[in-house]
Amino acid sequence: MKLAGLKSIENAHDESVWTATWVPATESRSALLLTGSLDETVKLWKPDDLILHHTNSGHCLGVVSVAAHPSGHFAASASLDSFVRVFDVDTNNTISTLEAPPSEVWQMCFDPKGTILAVAGGGSASVKLWDTATWTLVATLSIPRPEAPKPSDKNSSKKFVLSVAWSPDGKRVACGSMDGTISVFDVGRAKFLHHLEGHFMPVRTLAYSPTDPHLLFSASDDAHVHMYDAEGKTLIGAMSGHASWVLSLDVSPNGAAIATGSSDRTVRLWDIGMRAAVQTMTNHTDQVWGVTFGPAGGPGRLASVSDDKSISLYDYS
Amino acid sequence: MACVYIPVQNSEEEVRVALDQLPRDASDILDILKAEQAPLDLWLIIAREYFKQGKLEQFRQILEEGSSPGQLLLAKGEVEQASAAFKIVLDGDRDNVPALLGQACVQFNRGRYSDSLELYKRALQVYPNCPAAVRLGIGLCRYKLGQYDKSRQAFQRALQANPENVEALVALAIMDLNTHEATGIRKGMEKMQRAFEIYPYCAMALNYLANHFFFTGQHFVVEQLTETALAVSNHGPTKSHSYYNLARSYHSKGDYEKAGLYYMASVKEVNKPREFVFPYYGLGQVQLKLGDLKSALANFEKVLEVYPDNSETLKLGQTEKAQEFMRKATKIDPRDAQAFLDLGELLISSDPVAALDSLKTARTLLKKGGEGIPIEVLNNLGVLHFERGEFELAQQTFREALGDGIWLAFIDGKENSPPVDACASVLRYKDMHLFQHLQKEGRVVDLPWSKVTALFNMARLLEQLHNTETASTLYCLILFKYPDYIDAYLRFAAIAKARNNLQLSIELVNDALKVNPKCPKALSMLGDLELKNDDWVKAKETLRAASEATEGKDSYDTLSLGNWNYFAAVRNEKRNPKLEATHLEKAKELYTKVLAQHSANLYAANGAGVVFAEKGHFDVSKDIFTQVQEAASGNIFVQTPDVWINLAHVYFAQGNFALAVKMYQNCLRKFFYNTDSQILLYLARTHYEAEQWQDCKKTLLRAIHLAPSNYALRFDAGVVMQKFSALTLQKEKRTADEVRLTVSELGNAVRVFKQLSASAASNLHFYGFDEKKIDTHVEYCKHLLEAARVHLKNAEHEEQKNRHKQEALRQMALAEEARRKAEEQRKFQLERRMREDELKQVRQQEEHFERIKEQWKSSTSSKRRDRSEIDDEEGGNSEKRRRKGGKRRKKDKHSRSRYETEDVEAEIMDDQEELEDENAKINYREPSGQINDQDDYAEENAHDPLAAAGLEDSDAEDEVAPESTASRRRRAWSESDDDEQLDRQPEPGEIRENYPDMPGSDGGKLDEEGAINDDE
């Protein structure tokens, strides 16, 4: 497996680019790359030349997360002011604005069928599930708090939820917290199942393998990537190599590789079979906040976005 | 009648044997001789008596039995006599086997190995079924003659003849050990062990076993073995070796008195230093330690006699001379690898670059000569590369040093740790599962002691290359094989600490302390961890213990205590000035103490700088920080981000915001990969003071993005937006756009505060947030928002009015323009008409002239041309004049419009005054609530030093209390340092983790590997 640089756009945004995802192709157009930035805009880009397709403004305080519906018709963007805006990708009409105060909004993820949007709820120590037909809050998956916390315990915010991921069969939601624990939920019964331990620093990104509903990857500030059997509660392996926080992670559509972006300014490609980094890209000059593989079925693509305001597109083969 | 007395072993009694009454059956007497290990002369006397009596069978029996090398050795003193006796026999019968053997033994002991070998060979030819002893003798002779392969064969044959032959086993084992290869050493040790099992009283085997256990650090076993060896042997060299082992064991434990005694005993057993020189060296070292310099010198001189080039010896006191000597040696013979090696080792501590060069040369020479390169040399080379940041080369070198082994599977990532329960994974790294699993699979999980250092360094290198997973596995492997290896525990703990796994880290340090409860390194680390865990009292005790363990000689712990005091000074919630002063004074004292001992200690200097800054001597502290920063650059193991931060703080406190910003930014980038939200907070505060509101807000948003659960940052962001908006509204001149921006910022601020207030009820009390206070902010922002809306309306109204006016003006200008154009047109027409008239006139004149010309039939055309040119010129001039006129008119228009603008401005000014009144009102009302909260807030906030207050304070003061700037800065400073100290605190730990390890492993470890133990 190999990455080859295709195109880089310097100053793609006016400020740090914090998040990116691919919007799947529809009947009328090809797949698009969706990026969000501290400059309070969300931009849509046409591959492979990364031609600016549209700019959405209206967010306040920086866009922290974007998610695309599997149909490719609509997408959601969330900002530091804790609003989620759901919009039509082609017309940019706002479909709905979601908020669940006092819960903040961090990573977001549509379930594989596209019926539910899962939102990492920050300090509320929960994942909020929104119905994508009615845009109403259908469930709150709360992490159970340790019993009888000491009054002096400063760490009750430890279960601050940062990241969220759906298993490919849509039955499980996993969420990662500031204290490094990962919690797994049974969506059907809206029930907490168990914790996965091993990290002791924030887990910024979670991703399930698209081919194995048990295999979960986590990216943490401890510079490690962990590989869990989320059902069997086992830590299968840990991969080190990044020099600083691992901020972002994505699994390739065939499930054979993962890509990670780190504060050490690099993008790494890992062979899951070998559990080793096979390639390191050093084209970014600041923290890499987002990496995302192109949708299955399309050409092998990987995009990365960074604090250096740039977007890079690679060919993955 | 003549009698002989056979002494009974271990007693004063003797057995009397009358020579004329020797029993017919020689085996009776043989039993006695053997049992009491009678001296050889008795055997000979008895044998001779049988010979005299013509009982040849018995004579042969006794000599055969009595002539094994073991017996001869026991009877060392009577060698000459024995030789004479054997000679008599051999003269009579050339092929008398027992005599041949006896004589061979004699020759062996005389050092005439080839003669001895000949005799043994003859014995073997005459009597091919001779006892194993003959083979053994052959083997020993060949060994002494350097024919190792043949000697090995001989020993092996002896062993075939009798698998229980201890001597042969021991001999083979020694040969295996001398190969200095992992597999050889392992085989050798196995044989030794077998020999020990067969016959637990073989002194030689005991000594070698003791030697092995000394290197693995099992001192108790060493003592047991050597004591047994001493009890069973009275052979001088063997005893000497045993005493030496015992002495070494005590030496390494630090018991110099006992070590000295045993070295002395060992030396006494040695006839000539040449035979066994090590105890002299050890004795010298111990005497040096005990202050007996003269004796030490004498002993070292003896060592030098034997090893004139022993650099270890020369190093004592005269390193430079030695270096010079070695340099000369390398010049005299540029192909002497050993000289280069020694030179390299000498230079390591003083001149790493030169050391690297000479070690490299040595390596090349050794390679050329086809010789193996000692592991320790490769290890040193690797460390030197490592220290110079040449990681690739270092890795190659360590790999070469390590050779083949199980570790390669880990380094190359071929073996991965098996899956573990993710609920119990806290202790995952202590799991030796992996190795046990591999062993079960039949893989050899082995690690020779000689390679441990290189493996440890390899793991350190992998850590540096961020491959912490593999590094952990290697440390684990070391601990699996050598559970007493403290450094591996500590590095392991450091890895866990870096990953914030404090529980595991503390556990590992405690494991290390189980090995050595007074290990200062482990204690320091424990103190550090306890500080991190916010366990103040415990931490102080641990650090004290660490300091005591080193008898105050180790500056690290003094430094830590200094930090502790400083920490305590600025941390004190109540800010008791007296207490603060005492703590500061104590901190300064401790830093100075360290500086007095080690004037180049960066960390102490940094600490002193902080104390100076704390006392307001910014210039002094700035100088100190700058120097420290310069000194710290250039060493990969010294990372001092805190110096940068401190420098930035000083710039900030001195009001040099631009430089402070640059400093913070560089520091963030250089040391933290831009991930430290705390420094971002400092940066934001600097922007705030510099009134760069947008930068400040962006910086805070970045910080929130990095540390999402830090609600203080959100609060700060809210305050910045509030402040920015309030200031914009107070501005004398502002555009509608600005006001519009203000309105949206205020909207954000309200949202941020509202969210905080909503969360405050549930789980934010520990941030020191007070619902009421946040509500006050919400109210204030809302109020501002309302005001801003009014202003916006006004501004928009104004803008519209302006637009109307401008429109009117534009219309007027247009009209004017039209008028002007019409005028111009008119003028133009007029001129044209005039010109046409002129032309007409000219033409008329011309015609007239033509007519006259025709009439006169002569002409002057040149004149005519001149005339027309002049006309043209006049036309151009008039054009210019007209343009000037146009300009003048424009100016007039301008001045008029300026008067108009002034009118407009006057109106705005009126508005402004009103507005300012309004603002003032707000200002008076709002802070009253804020200021009261302020103190509570500070107090609550104190234990969470993420100084939201840093911003909050200055905000409140800016708006309200006319506190002096100086004191405000000072406060901001000290608060910031509070935080900064948090950063700084673990920093010396970092040196600890990084720095002493490497030199330790290259200097100290080397010695352990060499035959000579230097416990310096």
Image (cartoon, coloured by chain):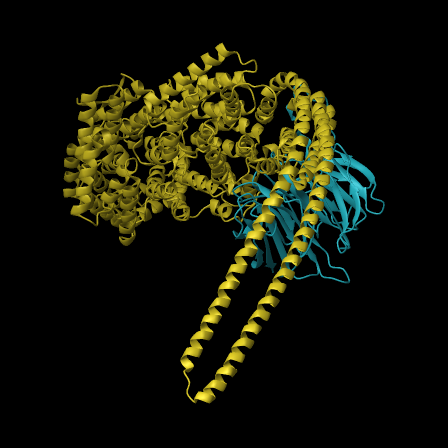
Chain colours: A cyan, B yellow
Does residue B50 lie above or below B138 as drawn? above
In this orientation, does residue B548 appear?
A: yes
Query: Residue B485 appears at what percent x and percent y?
Result: 44, 31
Query: Residue B963 appears at what percent x and percent y?
Result: 55, 18
Quadrant in the picture for the N terminus of chain B? top left
Side (left or right) of B742 relative to B279? right
Query: Residue A110 appears at what percent x and percent y?
Result: 75, 47
Does residue B1007 lie above or below B369 as drawn? above
Residue drawn where x is 84% and y is 47% of the image: A133
In this orientation, does residue B25 appear?
A: no
Task: Looking at the picture, tell me which residue is in the foreground, A248 or B832.
Answer: B832
Task: Looking at the picture, tell me which residue is in the foreground, A106 or B192.
Answer: A106
Q: Quadrant of residue B253?
A: top left
Does residue B134 lie above or below B754 as drawn? below
Task: Looking at the picture, tell me which residue is in the foreground, B70 or A147.
Answer: A147
Quadrant in the picture for the C terminus of chain B? top left
Side (left or right) of B826 relative to A144? left
Residue drawn where x is 57% and y is 69% of the image: B834
Query: Residue B168 appears at what percent x and percent y?
Result: 34, 40
Q: Quadrant of residue B926?
A: top right
Task: Looking at the picture, tell me which residue is in the foreground, B394 or B100.
Answer: B394
Does residue B793 lie above or below B883 as drawn? above
Which residue sits furthest right? Answer: A134
Q: Count the numbered circles shown.
A: 0
